[in-house]
Amino acid sequence: MARRRRIYEGKAKVLYEGPEPGTVVQYFKDDATAFNNQKKGVITGKGMLNNRISEYLMQKLEGIGIPTHFVRRLNMREQLVREVEIIPIEVVVRNIAAGSISQRLGIEEGTPLPRSIVEFYFKNDELGDPMVSEEHITAFGWASPQDIDDMMAMALRINDFLVGLLLGVGIRLVDFKIEYGRWWDENDQMRIILADEITPDSCRLWDSQTNDKLDKDRFRRDMGGVEEAYQEVARRLGILPEGGPQDVKGPVSIN
Ligand code: TMP
């Protein structure tokens, strides 16, 4: 096969030119980073699991009318997605205090928030993704007030839906980060659609009984059991790779 053109390489994914115009191949790596690249490592089997998990969640979201970039999965590590212009804003939704909000505002981790809170961060590695307000976003032209309304409304719908879906498999959705892209439809109408990924890299997921962490915090905080945590999320969602956990190169114990 002819070598595909690589469009972009990020910390956890590589984007290649897609087979049809307007498409991109999203390849999920096992590489993991934290604290803006200061901590680096490999989580064996993560790429394959995240590919499946993001596919599954995006398809479910399409099912409730959230437009996403997901087209179809190509193989164990790759999915075909629509080519979009990424809006340089990371949208974080929080249900329970953890991570940066706990640190910044001195709220003990695990404290339920009075309501779901939406935050915006400017996507810029050099600056360490600083938190920004709607004022910054509109003043600097990263997105319009209408775009912000759309992103916010979608983020809250995504949150409501995922909270329920995950609770059904014994997982509390503590918080998550999403990214959106601009996509032009057949009539050249611009639409904002969900892009990037939704995986244990981009969410905090706690076991609803024990509060055990089933996400990238296990890597960030050197807790061990990282591969097992990602596998457990996939197992609970009923989407472990076809051959079962043996397909995942790494520990096979999932209990
Ligand atoms: P935070 O508490 O560190 O601000 O993270 C909030 C959520 O966003 C958490 O689920 C992890 C996710 N996240 C990313 O996906 N990428 C990032 O670069 C950061 C800082 C957080």
Image (cartoon, rainbow, N blue to C red):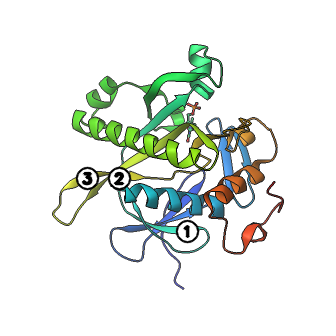
Q: Which residue is mark 2?
A: 66
Residue at the spot x=80%, y=38% of the render?
A: 223
Across and down, in percent, residue 110 comes to 64, 25
Mark 2 lies on a secondary structure that is loop
Look at discs 2 and 1 and give the one toward the viewer: 2
Whether disc 2's CB lies below 8 Å from ligand 1 is answered: no
Residue at the spot x=51%, y=42% of the render?
A: 163
Which numbered circle lies on residue 78?
1
Dot 3 amino acid type: Arg
User: Would residue 11 be visible to someone looking at this image?
Assistant: yes
Upstream in the sequence, badge 2 or badge 1? Answer: 2
Mark 1 lies on a secondary structure that is strand
Dot 1 amino acid type: Glu
Q: Which residue is mark 3?
A: 191
Upstream in the sequence, badge 2 or badge 3? Answer: 2
Neighbor class of circle 3 (other Cα within 10 Å; few <14, some 14-19, many 20+) is: some
Across and down, in percent, residue 173 comes to 57, 39
Gap between marks 3 and 1 measured at Cα: 24 Å
Dot 2 amino acid type: Ile
User: Residues at badges 3 and 1 in contact (C-beta under 8 Å)?
Assistant: no
Gap between marks 2 and 3 measured at Cα: 11 Å
In the picture shown, does residue 22 fall above or below 105? below
Residue at the outermost left position: 187
The picture quadrant for ligand 1 comes to top right
Across and down, in percent, residue 21 comes to 33, 73
User: Residues at badges 2 and 1 in contact (C-beta under 8 Å)?
Assistant: no
